[in-house]
């Protein structure tokens, strides 16, 4: 299944003998453990609980989820099969609402069925498998391409800030924003990274710091509310972030707190870069106002790790993502190159030249 790509990290997700094997990201950084999903429900729960997370990884998980469904379908009746697969797609899509990669991949899987109406159940199963593996390989390829484009923006001796985890753990094995750092390191550039801890679930502390340290990239962890001070002290040269969904005008949804960084970057006149594959664009929406924002369990805010930090019945607001206005974004780095403003015009141009990969 895997083609030759330079390995810098441990794969986040893999299809092994009919089982989806994923790193259980809830256990990191203390334990590197795996979850073995043998059915769609287990995979749905792994997505919902953030055992597997990050927009591109969610796309691949969705594709493999459909394969789990296929495996358990025994009949030969095509009508029943098609209905069953579409129901599975809807079920997987109900796991998390914001990352559009999940929905783009499910649409791709549905298109395989729609575009091959003449095939038998067995033949459709083969086509769906082929598509899922293609999407898996595509993720590995485009991450490395984004990395190369992004690395052109990195100069020796610079220091960067990142939020959440847009790394190998958010993709199959390389990352978007962190892929830029991996690529720069492969080119022997010398630079430092600050990672925001990213409350409430600490993807920056638990995942980004873990993976950058393993990759031997000089990384310093900060609390989210230290970012402004660092920028004021002249310690940051640019911000690199991932995104979960980008609208036609360039508005970008990402982990809550990303918008704060973009506002701060504007004030301190620092470049703010978003790194995403084309599969993270939602061309059906004209602006970020239409992006559905996931609200999560209040318990995530009421505690820090295992420790309850507020009274159990305290009222909580817990949106998992925010939307950064396109006017605050310096450039969007994709596998097809770096997109600069005006984003509405230039995003359209990129999609005209290249068919969306997923
Ligand atoms: O809630 P999460 O951990 O799934 O949120 C992930 C992010 O916000 C990432 O920054 C985003 O998916 C981009 S990952 C390449």
Image (cartoon, rainbow, N blue to C red):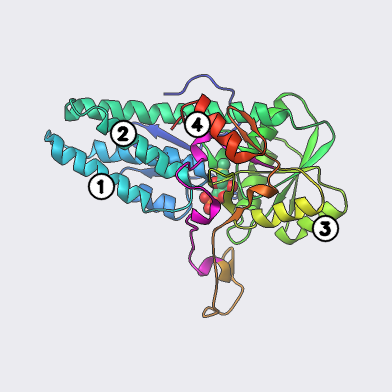
Residue located 76% across and 51% down the image: 266
Judged from the image, the secondary structure of the residue bearing numbered disc 4 is helix
User: Mark 1 sits on what residue?
Assistant: 87
Q: Earlier in the sequence, mark 3 or mark 1?
A: 1
Q: Are marks 4 and 2 in contact (CB under 8 Å)?
A: no
Q: CA distance from mark 3 to mark 1?
A: 49 Å
Magenta-colored span: 273-300
Comparing marks 2 and 1, which lies closer to the viewer? 2
Distance from Cα at disc 3 to Cα at disc 2: 49 Å
Label 3 vs label 4: CA separation? 36 Å
Q: Is residue 172 visible?
A: no
Mark 4 or 2 closer to N-term? 2
Does the residue tagged 2 have its C-beta within 8 Å of any atom of ligand 1?
Answer: no
Gap between marks 2 and 1 measured at Cα: 14 Å
Looking at the magenta stretch, what is its main secondary structure? Answer: loop
Task: Check whether the beta carbons of the residues at disc 3 and disc 4 lie within 8 A of each other.
Answer: no
Toward the viewer: 265 or 85? 265
Mark carried by residue 139: 4
Q: Quadrant of residue 69?
A: top left
Examine the structure image and report whether residue 135 is included in the region drawn in magenta: no
Residue holding disc 3: 229
Circles 3 and 2, Cβ within 8 Å, touching? The answer is no
Q: Residues within 10 Å of mark 4 (few under 14, many from 20)?
A: many
Residue at 57%, 68% in the rendered image: 301
Q: Are marks 4 and 1 in contact (CB under 8 Å)?
A: no
Image position of 326 (left or right of 51): right
């Amino acid at each position: 299944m895997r083609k030759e790509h330079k390995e810098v990290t441990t794969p986040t997700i893999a299809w092994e003998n009919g089982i989806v094997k994923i790193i259980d990201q809830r256990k990191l950084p203390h334990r590197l453990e795996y979850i073995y999903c043998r059915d769609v429900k287990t995979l749905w729960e792994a997505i919902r609980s953030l055992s597997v997370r990050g927009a591109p990884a969610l796309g691949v998980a969705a594709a493999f989820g459909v394969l789990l469904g296929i495996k358990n379908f025994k009949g030969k009746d095509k009508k029943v099969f098609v209905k069953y697969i579409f129901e599975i797609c809807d079920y997987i899509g109900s796991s998390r609402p914001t990352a559009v990669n999940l929905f783009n991949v499910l649409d791709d899987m549905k298109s395989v069925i729609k575009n091959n109406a003449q095939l038998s159940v067995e033949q459709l199963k083969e086509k769906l498998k082929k598509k899922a593996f293609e999407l898996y390989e595509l993720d590995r390829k485009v991450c490395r391409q984004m990395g190369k484009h992004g690395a052109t923006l990195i100069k020796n001796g610079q220091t960067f800030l990142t939020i959440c985890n847009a790394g190998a753990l958010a993709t199959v094995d390389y990352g978007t924003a962190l892929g830029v750092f991996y690529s720069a390191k492969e080119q022997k550039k010398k630079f430092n990274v600050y990672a925001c801890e990213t409350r409430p679930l600490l993807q920056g502390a638990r995942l980004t710091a873990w993976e950058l340290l393993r990759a031997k990239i000089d990384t310093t962890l900060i609390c989210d509310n230290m970012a402004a001070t660092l920028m004021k002290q002249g310690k940051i040269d640019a911000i690199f972030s991932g995104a979960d969904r980008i609208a036609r005008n360039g508005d970008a949804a990402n982990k809550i707190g990303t918008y704060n960084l973009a506002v701060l970057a504007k004030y301190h006149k620092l470049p703010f870069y978003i790194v995403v594959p084309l599969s993270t664009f939602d061309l059906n929406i004209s602006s970020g106002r239409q992006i559905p924002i996931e609200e999560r369990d209040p318990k995530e805010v009421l505690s820090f790790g295992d420790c309850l930090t507020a009274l159990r019945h305290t009222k909580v607001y817990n949106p998992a993502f925010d939307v950064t206005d396109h006017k605050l974004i310096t450039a969007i780095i994709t596998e097809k190159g770096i997109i600069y403003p005006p984003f509405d015009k230039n995003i359209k141009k990129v999609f005209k030249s290249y068919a969306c990969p997923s």
